Image (cartoon, coloured by chain):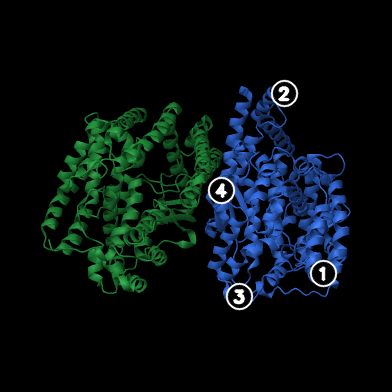
Chain colours: A green, B blue
Amino acid sequence: MPESFDQLLAKVNEIHDLAMAGSVLNWDREVNMPKAGTEARIKQMTTVHKLVHEMSTADEVGELLEAAEADTARADYDSFDASLVREVRRNYDDARKLPSEFVARVTETSGQAHQAWVAARENDDFESYSPWLEQIIGLAQEMAELYGYEDEPYDALLDRFERDTLTATVRSTFDALKAATVPLLDDISASAVDVDDAPLHQPFDVEAQEEFARYAAEAVGYDFDRGHLGTSVHPFSTSFSRYDSRITTRWYPDFLSPSLFGTMHESGHAMYEQGTGPELARTPLARGTSMGFHESQSRMMENMVGRSRGFWSAHYGELRQRFPDQLGNVPLEAFYAAINKVQPSYIRVEADELTYNLHIVLRFELEQDMLNGDLVARDVPEAWNAKSQELLGVTPPTDRDGCLQDVHWTRPSFGYFPTYALGNLYAAQLLEAAKEADPRIAPELHEGQVSALVEWLRENVHRHGKKYPPTELVARATGRELSPDAFVRYARAKFGELYGV
Amino acid sequence: MPESFDQLLAKVNEIHDLAMAGSVLNWDREVNMPKAGTEARIKQMTTVHKLVHEMSTADEVGELLEAAEADTARADYDSFDASLVREVRRNYDDARKLPSEFVARVTETSGQAHQAWVAARENDDFESYSPWLEQIIGLAQEMAELYGYEDEPYDALLDRFERDTLTATVRSTFDALKAATVPLLDDISASAVDVDDAPLHQPFDVEAQEEFARYAAEAVGYDFDRGHLGTSVHPFSTSFSRYDSRITTRWYPDFLSPSLFGTMHESGHAMYEQGTGPELARTPLARGTSMGFHESQSRMMENMVGRSRGFWSAHYGELRQRFPDQLGNVPLEAFYAAINKVQPSYIRVEADELTYNLHIVLRFELEQDMLNGDLVARDVPEAWNAKSQELLGVTPPTDRDGCLQDVHWTRPSFGYFPTYALGNLYAAQLLEAAKEADPRIAPELHEGQVSALVEWLRENVHRHGKKYPPTELVARATGRELSPDAFVRYARAKFGELYGV
């Protein structure tokens, strides 16, 4: 290894260590910290992030990069050295594009917008939030210009979360997805099958829920020897290294789904991090490659594994044993139907597997309009409701159940939403490819076992970390570009069977 | 406030935030982290500590300090500005005295010595550890020369933990303490009173222990709204701000004392941090002033409050209610005697309140001999055993129960041990002064209430943080220099009564 690369690596390692310290501060804040500690903790986190930013964008890094680029110019594209230099170069160039004055303005405005949004949502008062949303749109437009783009401004923002993925690609993908989903949804609505999800809404002892959540996390392949399950208001997953990749869950005493499927969801995220190659440690490559790919891992474990008949045929007994009063009289088939009930609704985070993507398409389309100046803040509620009716067949009764429901637009992070649906599409495409590549996988899943699937994911997705952008990784793993086809096939088969359509 | 001070303060705030991030990494490691995460976590902590050191010793800080010193030269000695500049100056000068080559050597050698010690203790094989101890002694001698001293080398090391406290002072204090304790111990040994501590060694449900530990922590004044109780192998207390000051405990299923008194001990530490003045936030002044003063707060809550008759007359009912099978037939007086049983033994961490100090005197005397070159590593076991016989009347059967029992001598941190006993002396002296100053305190304590005592501690000790060195703080709070007299009076009264001597 040339000396220049070693020097760059040493610097990158330090920056990464410090960034991980920032993640620990955040995890601790959500899981353990007494509320009174908030103010001091925010200052600690701000200082750590500031130092990370200063260190990452220092001229010194630019010089080390140039030398390392020259020295690794002939290194194999797939090598650790070449991959790291590529990634550091992109991060460095991106970070230097945003003047610190702009970054400070984003932080400041987003903080205030967040407060305004909390109040507006509580009072169902969009008007009071409208000027803030206008400012957020302005910041997003400014950010797009600062980053730069070739085709359209949204490309610049999408690239932050889904590298090298073009808006046009997502648009045509989502259009095809929409074209397939909406009629299927119509058929389901018209179907005579009535699914009852009341069994999920009963009193469930929280300690027993936690016990089963641990069981389920292990059943989908999460490694507790390199993990930790905590409790937080908003469930999340975070990793400080492949040897310490954590999940959190929330517990509702009278609703089983959030802890159960939330835990499997976060397990999928955390398993991605647990699977990154050990040689990538202490570098920005030791991470899932994109938000969409990350979501593919969580959605696969939550839905394609965790809401499958195979999984529950193997594990329903364990669940029933813990809740005999609640589930003793609920047959496996009724439980399977309940956890897969399709029901168009207003709220994204409560949406079922099928309608979820439509919630995302709605946001993706509105974000583009806002960014392009075709939709101003004050017109958002009307546009939202019209699209909701068009896509989901329902109109939210209030803005609180509509355009005020998500926290995302308190920051100029347009481009984040689409990654949720991309995750579903990647998941289906990966699962299909995995089953084709390894004939053990389908029968194992049918028996509720995941080892061969996880092995395939480790080999074809996890271990690469962030070495390849999602566009490249999906092609390497599945032999194809991103496409909605696998998801559409999956959804038609699963929900067609369930609803007899 | 002059601009130079503001600039210094901003820098100090950042360094402090980062140091707190390091503390969070450590807390999380002890409480939540999966063991597999150790290697990555050590690297993260090393990076954070390195950055803290680099930032603290940067020439820039020296320049800011000089300007701030000039600008605050006429500021009141007690003011925040003057106090902070004093403290930063001392830390800066101290830190710059150790070349980074030396610091690296200490870290490296201590790490290896620690491993060697673990093996040596396990195998009761002092000989294998002897060369490491020799190296540690050498490092301590080198460190003393680097820091510098006026009277004797031990002063330089003691000053790290107990600022401005001279070895000669501690020596004469401990001599007086020894002269009073040894005869009292002889009397107790000869006494006809036989205390039975078997009630403490029974099966105690761990969940009920935790419930009562929380109750006891609150009863001694710990504020859970600004705290957190976790579980760790080695109990400790740590604070990230006065609004987030945490304790940990360990739970033994068949021994009540560790969780019970350990929790009160750590509560005392944490309350000190919770009581530091809010204006000291994000600076090195937001800390207890010394190890000895810190220990005075923990020992006071553990022993002088937590093992008092008054405390248990108020709270024994609560404990009994949780453990009716274990304590239903144990009268208050028998419980009080059990938790105060005096019994010379080999192991410091298991020692009772009275013999504990003698364990410290032993170590203090040996450390001086080692540092002065009067005792070489290979002769330590013999010297240890002789002193143990002289002070405690017992000779450890093995080195594992003797000179290999503590982790402290795997680092060149001579001067740390005496602070444990200084804590006991400060505690007694503070408690006496508090009772004199506020007539509510004694009757309240008699009823198991601590509010007036805590109020006095907040006012006279806690709020000052690290503004004054311990030598100065004890004089301000009690009107006297450090002295063993209050402790001797306290011990004679308490144990004289218990053992009828």
Q: Earlier in the sequence, mark 4 or mark 2?
A: 4
Judged from the image, the secondary structure of the residue bearing numbered disc 4 is helix
- The residue closer to the viewer here, B417 or B54, is B417
Please give the residue where the numbered disc 4 appears in the rendered image: B24
Judged from the image, the secondary structure of the residue bearing numbered disc 2 is loop
1 or 4: mark nearer the eye: 1
Instruction: Report, in whole angstroms, how far the alpha carbon at label 2 lies from the one at label 1.
Output: 58 Å
Instruction: Report, in whole angstroms, how far the alpha carbon at label 1 lies from the one at label 4.
Output: 48 Å
Residue A74 percent across, percent down from the top left: 45, 40
Residue A60 percent across, percent down from the top left: 54, 31
Q: Are marks 3 and 2 on the same chain?
A: yes
User: Residue B457 — which label?
Assistant: none
Please give the residue where the numbered disc 1 appears in the rendered image: B500
Instruction: Report, in whole angstroms, how far the alpha carbon at label 3 lies from the one at label 2.
Output: 64 Å
Please give the residue where the numbered disc 2 appears in the rendered image: B74
Please give the residue where the numbered disc 3 appears in the rendered image: B328
Local crowd size for mark 2, using a 10 Å CA cut-off: few (<14), some (14–19), many (≥20): few
Q: Earlier in the sequence, mark 4 or mark 3?
A: 4
Inspect the image, locate mark 1, and give the three-letter code of the amino acid beneath it. Gly
Label 4 chain ID: B
Label 4 close to label 2 by CB (< 8 Å): no
Inspect the image, locate mark 3, and give the three-letter code of the amino acid beneath it. Gly
Residue B26 percent across, percent down from the top left: 58, 51
